[in-house]
Image: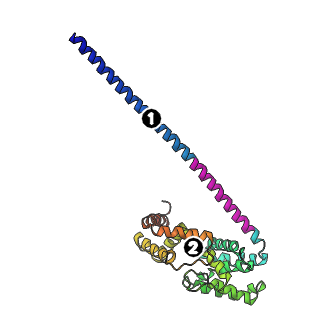
């Protein structure tokens, strides 16, 4: 009898173990199902993000296409002889300058100036010429290049074919007034347009140009020196108390300035970005 009871208890114990195992299996199954649902939700989220990214890309492509269509239309109103003269005689001179002031930069300032000019009652040919000449004075020296640029423009007798002396004087002043470190506000809407167009407020571009300039001026200094110099420069220029001023407050520049100021507050992030730029400049893609 006792043996039978012992066997019965053993059976019950095994049954309880089986039930426990079953419950464990059910628990594992529920966990797996939960993880599966989570994985499916993550996949749906990733797909949604991908759709969003594609939509943003299409939007960006549309914006770029629209931008260049606008430029093409605006340039139809530029005097073709003036455009030909500047394209053949002025723009090639920028090929001898540093990458921060090469013909690509000048062309971008021209295009941005023409886009901004649509908002104002201005002479489109004057806007075009001002943007084309605004950095040419770097040929004579960077420090006073805005003054030299104005002098070069004013001394170019070829411009009298398309502009009066009074217009040329306004253009000279606008070129002089474009520099961000100037203490005074541009004297005309033309100066404000070229100054705003020249504010290429893109964090990667700003850091690249700053590092490039530092390497050119201080070629023997190490990365930490170059970084601290770059950080101080962008803080002095773009920080909350920086000397850079936006005269027309274009949406693009306002957004860019906000992004740069946010980055200034994250010195570690800037350090990492500058290190990548420094390494590329020093060692290329190696």
Report the disc number at residue 32: 1
Q: Earlier in the sequence, mark 1 or mark 2?
A: 1
Specify whether residue 132 is painted magenta.
no
Image spot of residue 63 (x, y percent) = 67, 61
The span shown in magenta is 48-72
Residue 119, picture quadrant:
bottom right
Q: How many marks?
A: 2
Determine the CA span between mark 1 and mark 2.
57 Å
**Which mark lies nearer to you, 1 or 2?**
1
Question: Which residue is at a point 77% across and 83% down the rendered structure image?
Answer: 162
What predominant SS class does the magenta segment belong to?
helix
Q: Position of residue 151 (x, y in %)?
A: 64, 88
Q: Nearer the viewer, residue 155 or 229?
A: 229
Name the one closer to the observer, 224 or 13.
Answer: 13
Give the residue at x 24% y 14%: 5
What residue does disc 2 label? Answer: 100
Say above or below: 21 vs 166.
above
């Amino acid at each position: 009898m006792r043996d039978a009871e012992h066997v019965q208890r053993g059976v019950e114990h095994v049954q309880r173990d089986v039930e426990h195992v079953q419950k464990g299996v059910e628990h594992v199954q529920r966990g797996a199902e939960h993880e599966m649902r989570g994985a499916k939700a993550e996949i749906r989220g990733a797909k949604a993000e991908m759709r969003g990214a594609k939509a943003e890309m299409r939007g960006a492509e549309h914006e770029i296409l629209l931008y260049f269509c606008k430029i093409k239309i605006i340039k139809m109103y530029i005097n073709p002889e003036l455009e030909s003269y500047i394209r053949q005689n002025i723009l090639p001179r920028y090929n001898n300058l540093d990458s921060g002031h090469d013909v690509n930069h000048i062309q971008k300032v021209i295009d941005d100036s023409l886009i901004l000019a649509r908002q104002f009652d201005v002479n489109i040919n004057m806007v075009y010429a001002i943007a084309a000449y605004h950095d040419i004075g770097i040929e004579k020296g960077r420090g006073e290049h805005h003054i030299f640029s104005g002098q070069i423009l004013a001394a170019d007798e070829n411009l009298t074919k398309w502009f009066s002396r009074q217009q040329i004087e306004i253009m000279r002043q606008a070129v002089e007034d474009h520099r961000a470190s100037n203490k005074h506000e541009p004297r005309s809407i033309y100066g404000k347009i070229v100054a705003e167009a020249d504010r290429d407020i893109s964090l990667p571009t700003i850091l690249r140009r700053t590092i490039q300039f530092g390497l050119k001026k201080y070629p023997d200094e190490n990365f930490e020196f170059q970084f601290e110099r770059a950080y101080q420069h962008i803080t002095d220029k773009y920080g909350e108390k920086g000397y850079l001023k936006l005269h027309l407050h274009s949406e693009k520049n306002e957004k860019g300035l906000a992004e740069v100021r946010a980055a200034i507050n994250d010195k570690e992030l800037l350090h990492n970005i500058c290190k990548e730029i420094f390494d590329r400049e020093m060692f290329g893609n190696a």
